[in-house]
Image (cartoon, rainbow, N blue to C red):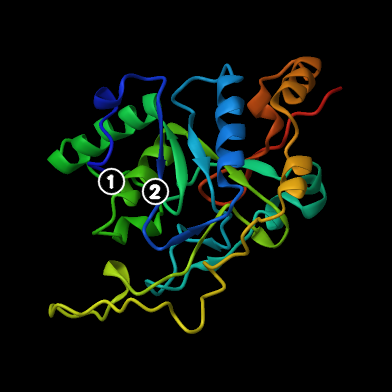
Amino acid sequence: MSGWNVSDIGGARQAALFLEDDLEASPMVFRWLEWCLALAASSRKPASELLGCAFHTPRVDELTPTPGTDDPLPWTPEQVLGRGALDSLPVFRMQVPCSWGALWLAAPWARFTAYYRARIRGDTGPPPLALKSHGWWMSWKRYLVEYMALQGAWMVYPAFPEQASFVTNHYEVGLHHYLATDAVQPIPDALRSEPDPRFCVPLLRDAAAVTRALPGVVALRTRAAACGCDVLDLLPLVGWQHTLVAPAAACT
């Protein structure tokens, strides 16, 4: 949270790339970053709606309450959108933040940090929404979950087959994953011997395949103009409840 103060960077037209220290990035990560920035620049959507672009495709629903703290429900975008639709354009919008590699846009980030400060001061309480993230006491992400749910804001996500992504998390032992005790625990440097398939996804490495899958933004603008919609309306929208909110716009 303290890593980026928008006013220090130079204004609302800036963006920042956040990567956690246990991520491995695909060689295609900057191709996706460039595509996302061009897509955002082509949109007429209010700045409050699009927060940024995720680099990781989820395999779990981490927001629906479950009995345990570490038992998120299995979920993939195919369950809601279908693989066929995603094969034609493997991108969707979702009202859930991604902390495992993301590009954030300055104006909505500034709005979120204002909300975060108000919550920390106690000016407002948690929203009356059934969110598992209410129990993430040590995570800033829970406030972003709240903010996005309340504002109807979203991020752009990749949705390639097998949830192949531009980053993967090796789910190393760390601050959120050591033994539940007040004693300080040493954190090993080694990777887990058996990666958790819920979080460790394949990395996209085929440059030609990624380029073929992501149409040029000019082509998307042309399609949007023909449909009479915003370019981002060509992407289906999934809500924080992990259900379809709005299908992709279709020309009539």
**Horizontal and vertical percent position of residue 32:** 60, 40
Quadrant of residue 238 within the rendered picture: top right
Name the quadrant of the N terminus: top left
- Point out residue 209 in the picture as x, y percentages from the top left corner: 77, 49
Mark 2: amino acid: Leu
Neighbourhood count class around disc 2 (C-alpha, 10 Å): few under 14, some 14–19, many 20 upward: few
Residue at the spot 40% in from the left edge and 63% down from the top edge? 22
In this rendering, position of residue 220 left or right of residue 184:
right
- Compared to residue 39, the image places residue 98 above or below, namely below
Q: CA distance from mark 1 to mark 2?
A: 8 Å
Q: Nearer the viewer, residue 16 or 128?
A: 16
Amino acid type, label 1: Pro
Q: In this rendering, is residue 148 above or below 223?
A: below
Which residue is tagged 2?
A: 129
- Say whether residue 124 is visible: no
234 displayed left or right of 197: right
The answer to whether the residue labelled 1 contacts the one labelled 2, judged by CB atoms less than 8 Å apart, is yes
Determine the residue located farthest toward the bottom in the rendered image.
193
Horizontal side of 61 relative to 66 (left or right) equals right
The residue at the point 67 percent across, 28 percent down is 233
Residue 94 appears in the picture as rendered: yes
Q: Position of residue 192 (x, y in %)?
A: 44, 80
Residue found 48% across the figure and 84% down from its top: 193
Q: Nearer the viewer, residue 158 or 76?
A: 158
Q: Give whichever of 204, 248 is nearer the camera.
A: 204
Callout 1: 10 Å neighbours few (<14), some, many (20+)?
few
Residue 19 at x, y percent in the picture: 40, 50
**Residue displayed at 67% across by 24% down:** 231
- The furthest residue to the right: 252
Residue, disc 1 = 126
Q: Quadrant of the C terminus?
A: top right
